[in-house]
Image (spheres, grey):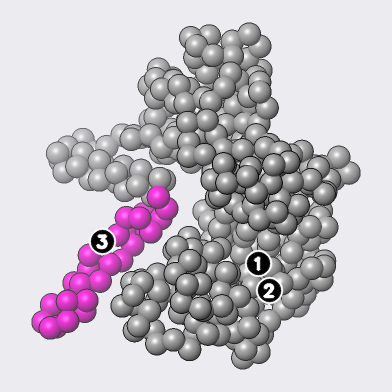
Amino acid sequence: MVVCVYLPRFELVIAAGGAEALAGRPLAVAPLLGTEQRVGEVSGAAEAHGVARGMALGEALARCPDLALVPGDPGGVAEAWEGALRALESIGAAVEPARPGLAYFEAGGLRGLHGTDAATIAAARRAGRPSSSATAPSIGGRGARVGAGPTRFCALAGALAVRSRRPLLLEGKGAQRWLAGRPVGLLGFRGETEPLLEPLHRLGVKTLGELAKLPRSALADRFGEAGVLAHRLACGEDTPLQARHVEERLEETLDVGEASSGPALERVLGVLVDRLLARSERRGRTLRAVALSARLLSGGGWRERVVFRQALSDRERISLALSVRLALLPAPAAALGFSVERFGPPAGEQGALLDQGRSHRAARLREAVAQVRAAAGREAALRAVCVDPESRVPERRVVLAPLPD
């Protein structure tokens, strides 16, 4: 059974400083400077005026003149969400994070530790119980919603349907019958099927049951792979979970004082890089993917993820690659942060003395595959395997398989 944990308005709660700030107030996450002017997550009061996430800023203000814009805090969101994921992993769960505030894990393998599925969910809530001074939404908080079902989509539908701390567990054929009555808007929680919402509404499709009754071939002809996936989800089918690969994280933060921009800020960045490279926890490993974050003087935050073309441990090259990203800061910074998201091999690793040409090419190929996986996920690099070269069907001749580590 798949368990879904949903924390509503996660990014807005972090930006506003707590769930209490949303009570009765029309709020929305302000768009970043230099980006498309569309609002982020919105509060319930703003939704009552017709404001929705992703709406153009001018239209949102026209519908709700009292709408208050809150600066986004990507760094705070990433930190709070990482804490929530580690709380789930502390009970033994292999977690698949979909986006900040939405995660899944398989409960079947945890029955030997906690007993029943209900006991597993209770253990997850206890592990994510907030402290008395915490302002970030957490799994054990009042606003968390938990649902469970045979697939992640059924579990998501169950989590969105509950309005209390009691989880909704869906099992067997009853889960599919219950899913048929849910609105087709649930497809908006999957990036692949979100563009289908508007055309499906124009066609008069309101529930997942109505979508499941349509021929899959017709949906494939009109919408392509997204239509096939939407039909599979409506029929209670889904792909298996892909748990995240847990990495050790190192972070350094420094208040910049008067050095809020310009060359002075680059020197602060150099200090952060020196501090992190000197940490004993690094154990001589290179850095493959890092994150640069800042707390802005005007409020809110900024965060930029950087994947190096080659795993680095040289201070000058790391500082040079990151200093270019400082120009993307939307406002002067009050504090600067530098963290490692993925490590590379140890810096002292050497190749074989013989056959240098072949080993050098193989090393470069491994480095390229590792870079692609760090930027786009483990399924981004695949290899073609010949299965049935004599087949007349092209899809049967060659299949794609993951590259070995």
List the residue tagged with mark 2. 158
The type of residue carrying mark 3 is: Arg
The type of residue carrying mark 2 is: Gly
First along the sequence among labels 3 and 2: 2
Q: How many marks?
A: 3
Q: Is residue 196 above or below residue 319?
A: below
Q: Is residue 200 left or right of residue 170?
A: left
Q: Is residue 75 above or below residue 177?
A: above
The type of residue carrying mark 1 is: Cys
Contact (Cβ within 8 Å) of mark 1 with mark 2: yes
First along the sequence among labels 1 and 3: 1
Say the numbered circle drawn on residue 383: 3
Q: Residues within 10 Å of mark 1 (few under 14, many from 20)?
A: many
Viewer-nearest of labels 3 and 2?
2
SS at badge 3: strand
Q: Is residue 126 left or right of residue 146?
A: right
List the residue tagged with mark 1. 4
Contact (Cβ within 8 Å) of mark 1 with mark 3: no
Q: Which one is nearer the viewer's eye here, 360 or 167?
A: 167
Q: Is residue 116 left or right of residue 319?
A: right
Which residue sits furthest bottom? Answer: 173
Query: Residue visible at 53% across and 9% down?
Result: 264
First along the sequence among labels 1 and 2: 1
Query: Residue visible at 45% across and 63% down?
Result: 195
SS at badge 1: strand
Query: Residue visible at 77% across and 38% down?
Result: 17
Q: Is residue 219 left or right of residue 95?
A: left
Give the magenta-colored segment's residue range.
376-405
Q: Position of residue 139 (x, y in %)?
A: 75, 56
